[in-house]
Image (spheres, helix red, strand yellow):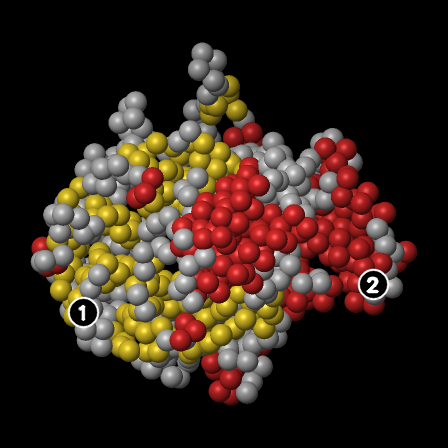
Amino acid sequence: MISKRCSIVAALIRTSALAGLTMAAGGAMAQSVPILQPGAPGQAPRVLTPEQAVQIANTSFSADDVRFMQAMILHHQQAVDMAALVKDRTNRKALVDAARRIDASQDDEIAFMRKWLTERGQAVQLPGGEHAMHALPAMAAMSSGIGMAGMATPAQMAELAAAKGPAFDRLFLQLMIAHHQGAITMAEDLLKRSGSAYDPILYEFVNSVINEQKAEIRRMNELLVGLVDDPRSSLKAGFRDAGQAISNLKLVASLPKPTGFFDPANPAGLPLSLLNEKKKGADKDDDKDSDDRSPLLSFANTDMAFSGDLLAAGNYHGFNLYRLGAGGAPQLVSSVICPGGQGDLSIVGNILIMSVEQTRGRVDCGRQGVQADVSQERFRGIRIFDISDVTRPVQVGQVQTCRGSHTHSVVSGPGEDGNIIVYVSGTAGVRKGEELPGCVGEVADIRTSLFRIDVVEIPVANPAAARIVDSPAVFADPATGNLAGLWRGGGHGEGTQETSRTDQCHDITVFPARSLAAGACSGNGIIFDISNPRQPVRIDAVNDPGFSYWHSATFNNDGTKVIFTDEWGGGGRPRCRVQDPRNWGADAFYDIVGGKLQYRSHYKLPAVQSEQENCVAHNGSIIPVPGRDIFVQAWYQGGLSVIDFTDSANPVEIAYFDRGPVNAKEMVMGGYWSSYWYKGRIYGTEIARGLDVFALEPSASMTENEIAAASLADYGGRFNPQQQFPVRWPAHPIVALAYLDQLERSRAVAPAATAELRQALGEARSVIDGRTKNGGLAARIEALAGGLGVATADAASAKRLAGLRETASGIAAQLR
């Protein structure tokens, strides 16, 4: 502020000096030439006097400045009105104190803003007066572009006035946090506008609004956490000793990162300010020069892949291989250091494929990085390893790509030709053509490397010969051929999210059994026809005004639904706070009907999370319970959720696990990158801490039979994150009992109608396990299953009954 004011004073001095010289010159030699002001085209010029000529419009403040102050007066007044409701509706001291602070600060600031406007000859009231506040919705934009963000609607104000006790406390904090966040949005928006907030007094005021509102939000968030019933909302922070909340799951194992995959001097990845504080035992406020930046994600755990009893866990620094023992407990068998991020993995036979995107990646897996702007030592693309000896993986192939590989998808193979086909998605900038010929970063150039995916062929017999065989422009407009044929980036209108431009896919999940792929592609959700894996064809694309960045896609078990996730904030910011929209950073559920995506619903983690927890939807997988669509979702530091989306319009959380933040003072990157089901267990890669293993526990939402049936599911003995196969269940009594449990839970059948069939299935299990035969029991089971009817006509019950009868027929065949 001092330097800015000095500049203004200096400018005034220079202006005064020039004016003096002009007057002196005028005294010595009078102006004889007329001073003209041209009019609009076709209008005659106007002759000005010298006094008129030197007059200019007042530029010490802008129209946006005035509108901001007028709007903020109304905005603050609503906060005062909300605070006035507190004394008659709650006796919670912390809330009463908060209301007094709000009332005092907002009153003072309203007086200041009125004075500022009056001194400059401006109207105090916004055009439209008091009606303007109620006429604008929560995120409406005014004609000048200065919004009224965070305002409570008249209906919300009425609801608040009618509430009392704990219900009032929660609603007051929720509305006031959103209100304060809105004031910050308005202030930050003004600062971005050219020519605005140049008045030093206004500039200082606007910044004080931002700082004070942020501090109040932090205090109110802490209050709200204490009022929320969900135990996930008030967990103790800690790296190794964080608080935990768990429901309908059991934590089977928790493994720290292996040696070599964390910095011993900073295992939690804390920013320098916290490290210095820890070393000195000093308060952070005493060290004003501390660096708040966190380390790069050099040791972050990333994605997983499974094959047989092998688990591969990726990391920005390389990868680790584990053998899965009894109960799914992992045992480390090898660690491979090969920096370069992102480290996503897939396994096909003895081939392991790894995505690399960062510019520090090297051809030789060196740890020293690459400093040169253009270098033949740099590697960005997919690495190929031979893991026939899992204790000594060997790099046997590489494919360089123009944008690197953020993720990849194993599409097919090895087929009769011995080749594996892989789609490679790069999300980073395009490298220079001098480093990799053919790379073009210009959007207007038809040769651009943007708006494409890379199709890679890997010969299993000779991985060193792997190559790009095509780079189809899958986002092109079919009518015009314009490569940028989908979302161009930006907002979708008032109150919507800013969405990234669709010039690449983050994830492409393939479902070969239906010749489909689902792409989460920055600004769009897409489905492709992959009948010819080398030439994917886009068949539908959707967007969502609440999605910021379409991140991942997962099919249900029969390929009739897709779950897309939104990585709002890029995964590195707190996005599950009480003031955050419930449909931003969420899952979106779509049904596939006639080859088209039809939106059904959004789902977001219900628990409120703190400012210290990066939280947004990330990677998950299907849990193969017959008769149901169930998904396990990672939320970074929001933990993981198990969600039933059998009714895709009404997804429901049925289990969860969460830890407190890595650190209580600062947001430190952590939480679950991925959570996947494999062979009866849920595995989660924790970015900062390590690897966790969970088992489902019986509950009102899921029976022991359903959990056991999921463990019997057969999906080919391997799991790659972006490759799905339909699950098959054996004709086993447990599977039939799982269907019966579901029919009874939904009240489609009464327990009395299933009692005899349950008994017969119990007998069948003993006979099958004993490897004997019983034709009479076989006939009885078929008759009981065939004669069972359902009381409801819904599609889910009909599907379960059909599954029960098919399973009963298979059981009968084994008994004969």
In this picture, is 702 found above or below 51? below
Amino acid at circle 2: Val
**Whole-percent x, y for residue 405 in the image:** 27, 54
**For the residue carrying disc 1, how many other residues have a C-alpha within 10 Å: few (<14), some (14-19), or many (20+)?**
few
* Quadrant of the image occupied by residue 9: bottom right
Q: Position of residue 359 (x, y in %)?
A: 25, 61
> What residue appears at the point 42 percent right and 77 percent down from the top-left corner?
255
Query: In the image, is residue 776 above or below residue 100?
Result: above
Question: Could you tell me which residue is drawn at 22 percent across and 56 percent down?
Answer: 381
The amino acid type, in three-letter code, at marker 1 is: Ser
Do the numbered discs 2 and 1 sit on residues whose CB atoms are within 8 Å? Answer: no
In the image, residue 177 sits, relative to residue 488, either above or below, namely below
- Extreme-right residue of the structure: 88
Residue 507 seen by the camera: no
Camera-side residue of 113 and 325: 325
Q: Secondary structure at mark 1?
A: loop
Residue 388, numbered label: 1
Nearest to the observer: residue 746 or residue 396: 746
Q: Position of residue 75 (x, y in %)?
A: 72, 45
Residue 420 marker: none
Q: How far apart, in angstroms, are the residues tagged by discs 2 and 1?
A: 67 Å
Q: Quarter of the image for the N terminus: give it.
A: bottom right
- Residue 59 in picture, x, y percent from top left: 56, 40
Of circles 2 and 1, the one toward us is 1
Is 807 on the left or on the right of 457, as rendered? right
> Which label's residue is closer to the chain start, 2 or 1?
2
Q: Secondary structure at mark 2?
A: helix
Residue at left offset 81%, top offset 55%: 168
Residue at image location 23% in from the left, 58% down from the top: 348
The residue that mark 2 highlights is 96
Residue 233, can we see it?
Answer: yes
